[in-house]
Image (cartoon, helix red, strand yellow):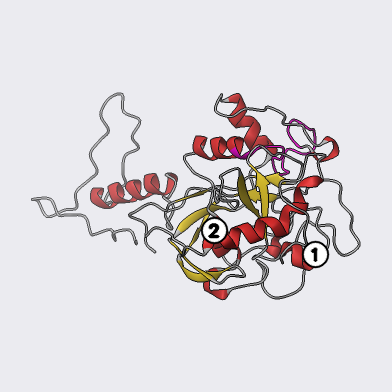
Amino acid sequence: MRSHTTPLAIPALIFAAAACGVLVAACGASPAAPEGAPLAGPSPAAQPAPATPSGGEATAPAPQPGSNAVPAPAGADPAAAQADSGQASASAAPAPPSDGCPDGMARVPGGSFVMGPLKVKATVADLCMDRTEVTAEAYAACVKAGKCTDSFANCAKEASTYGVAGKEKQPMVCVDFAQAEAYCAAQGKRLPRDDEWEWAARGGEEARPYPWGGEAPKDQLCWSGGGTVRKTACDVGSFPAGESPQGIQDLAGNVFEWTTSANDGKGKMRVARGGSWRDGIPPLVRTARPGGFEVTYRCGFLGIRCVVEPAASAPK
């Protein structure tokens, strides 16, 4: 089932872009939008040894010359031993994901909801979403493999993470829209749409105002609220109290995350979601709050999270 929105979606996104244009001024670049206030099985049992024609118990066959096999004790059932051996081999092999999602991703059940201030109805299919934002070290591996670029990867002075010792586990920042798309594609994934991102962050039908629930932000996220003023992002997954119902972390705070949804009607901007480490008041990290950035924009508080469709054979 493909997602869709009503024709009112474009006005909603234009409104959101105008409301969040203030976000883009922090890295010294020109604002991407006008100034405005942001929106808020058991083993087979061994059987008795078969009797020999003479009426006695069968003895185990002797190993062949050159064999490393250990003779089975007299009275052992060869079929049972073979079954046990097969079970041991099976246990050594990694079990396939039960939810149809690759390692490091969580399955988000699909559904429908009303999105944004203009009450646009959106429908989202099941999807797999990265449990954490893409780290600087993961992005560096993509560059090393020749599938990603590191152009302007240190654009933000103190907030840059690429190639910075001690920041390997922090989110990759200073990536524009094309670099974010290329990274996800190199992993066999893609960037999420705006509606997919919000559906996952709100806990689907639970409609949570924050990924963790209704409690006001405090120490559930990496942000500059509660008396803490940050100059850079945090290691991904450092705030487990802020995870979503599916165990997805940092959907509020840390860094904004690119989506593929345009919000200007011209294709020059894309919605980004989640708020960042710079934000210090609750409305700025709510699940419904959008942000807007030009596709060529890059800064120290904008990063990547990928999604992919679940395997077709996986149970729902």
Which quadrant: the N terminus?
Answer: bottom left
Residue closer to the observer: 205 or 139: 205
Q: Disc 2 or 1, which lies upstream in sequence?
A: 2
Rendered-image quadrant of the C terminus: bottom left
Residue 214 vs residue 37: left or right?
A: left
| x, y percent for residue 104 | 55, 49
Magenta range is 161-177
Q: Secondary structure at mark 1?
A: loop
- Name the quadrant containing residue 289: bottom right
What amino acid type should be assigned to the residue bearing mark 2? Ile
Residue 222 position in % (x across, y down): 78, 56
Q: Which residue was labeled with disc 1?
A: 219
Badge 1: residue crowd in 10 Å (few <14, some 14–19, many ≥20): few
Report which residue position mark 2 lands on.
Answer: 10
Q: Position of residue 238 (x, y in %)?
A: 74, 54
Q: In terms of depth relative to the viewer, which is nearer, 233 or 280?
A: 280
User: Is 55 rendered above or below residue 136?
Assistant: below
- Queried whether the magenta region covers residue 90, the answer comes back as no
